[in-house]
Amino acid sequence: MKYTRKWLSFIVLAGALSVTGCGASGTGEGAQQAPKEEAQSVTQLQPDLKTGVNSVLQEVQKLENYLKTSSQQETINKFGKEIAKKWDSFEEDVEKAHPDQYTKIEANLYPLIAETGKQQLDIAKIQELVKKVQADLNMFLKQLQS
C-alpha cells in the first residue's frame, strides 16, 4: 500500500511539474492565477473530504453494529476491505491538505484494517480500534466543518 502511495505521489509530482513548467512560459498571468486556483481547489476539496469521511464513518459504524451481534470472519474481512477502499478513494487529498490529521487517523485506521484481515480475529482489539477510528474521524469531520 505504501509502495502504491509513493508511486502515485511520484506520478502526481511529475504531472504537477509538467503543468507548472507549461505555465512558466506564459506572460506571467498564470503565476498570478495560481494562488486563486489553489484556494478554489482547497474550497472544492472540503465537501469531497466531508463526504469521504462520512462514508468511512458509516462503514466503521456498520462494522461496530455487526460486532455486537456476530463475528463471522468472512464478513469482518469484507468490512475491512470496504473501509480500506473508501479511505483510499480520498486518502491522498487528506494527506496533502491535512497532514497532521492524516497521520493521526492512519495510526488507528490501518491497524483496524489489518486486524479485520487476519485469519485469527481478535474481536476485542477490533472493537477498541473501531472506537479510536470513530473518534479520530469525528474529530477530523468537526475540523472540516469549522
Image (cartoon, rainbow, N blue to C red):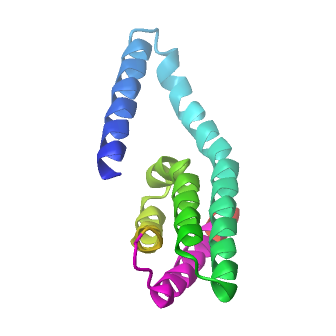
The outermost residue toward the bottom is 124
Task: Say which of 122 and 125 sits in front.
Answer: 122
Residue under the point 54% across and 53% down: 85
Quadrant hosting residue 6: top left
Query: Would you say 119 lies left or right of 45 here?
Result: left
Residue under the point 46% across and 67% down: 113
In percent of width and height, residue 92 lies at 47, 48
Residue under the point 63% across and 74% down: 63
Kindly report the secondary structure that dominates the magenta region of the rendered protein: helix
**Residue 146 visible (yes or no):** no
**Residue 93 visible (yes or no):** yes
Query: Would you say 56 lies left or right of 18 here?
Result: right
> Where, quadrant-wise, is the C terminus in this rendering?
bottom right
Quadrant hosting residue 144: bottom right
In percent of width and height, residue 108 lies at 44, 74
- The number of numbered badges drawn on the structure is 0
Task: Say which of 96 and 59 sits in front.
Answer: 59
* Numbered range of the magenta stretch: 118-141
Task: Say which of 61 and 139 sits in front.
Answer: 61
Is residue 137 in the magenta section? yes
Residue 59 in the image: above or below residue 90: below
Query: Would you say 128 lies left or right of 57 here?
Result: left
In percent of width and height, residue 112 lies at 46, 73
Is residue 94 in the magenta section? no
In percent of width and height, residue 135 lies at 58, 80
Quadrant hosting residue 14: top left
Task: Say which of 44 and 72 sits in front.
Answer: 72
Residue 60 in the image: above or below residue 84: below
Residue under the point 60% across and 38% down: 41
